[in-house]
Image: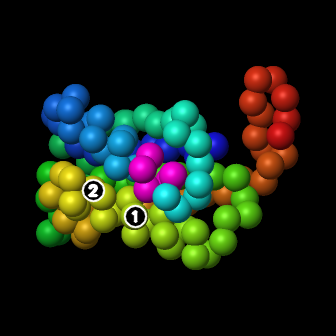
Amino acid sequence: MPLVKVNMLKGKAPEFKKAVFDCIHEGLIDAFGIADWDRFQRIEEYDRASWEAPEGKTENFMIIELTIFPGRSREQKKCAIEKITGLLCEKLGIPATDVFIIMNEPPLENWGMGGVQK
């Protein structure tokens, strides 16, 4: 059950955002073996005054935060990063240098679903 948060500049078309979601989800299916229905994704958009990125980044620069259950191997995480980045490059033309991915793994005791602690 990865929770996905994508941070990006405002102004992208709904079709672009949907494609970003689809690329990330496809990468997570391939790398982590999650179910197709397991989509918990959101985009947070920022105006120019609230967004700063290093020199050389394009308008498509994004920060992707994945909050995941602990226990995935280093190889699975590497695969997720490579798959997601590759799909964003291939399908949307986003340079790999514009994709920043970070994974957070809170312990299961910090997860609650449907009122039940995991």
> Is the stretch drawn in magenta largely helix, strand or loop?
helix
**Structural crowding at the residue carrying mark 2, measured as other residues with C-alpha within 10 Å and reported as few (<14), some (14–19) or many (≥20):** many
Residue 64 left/right relative to 73: left
Q: Determine if the magenta segment contains residue 27.
A: yes
Residue 16 left/right relative to 83: left
Name the residue: 55% across, 33% down.
37
Name the residue: 85% across, 35% down.
117
Q: Please tell me whether residue 73 is drawn above or below residue 32 in the rendered image.
A: below
Image coordinates of residue 49 in percent, x first then y, are: 21, 42
**Structural crowding at the residue carrying mark 1, measured as other residues with C-alpha within 10 Å and reported as few (<14), some (14–19) or many (≥20):** many
**Can you identify the residue that label 1 sits on?**
83
Q: CA distance from mark 1 to mark 2?
A: 9 Å
**Can you identify the residue that label 2 sits on?**
88
Q: Determine if the magenta segment contains residue 18.
A: no
- Bounds of the magenta segment: 25-29
SS for dot 1: helix
Image coordinates of residue 111 in percent, x first then y, are: 76, 40
Q: Which quarter of the picture shows residue 107?
A: bottom right
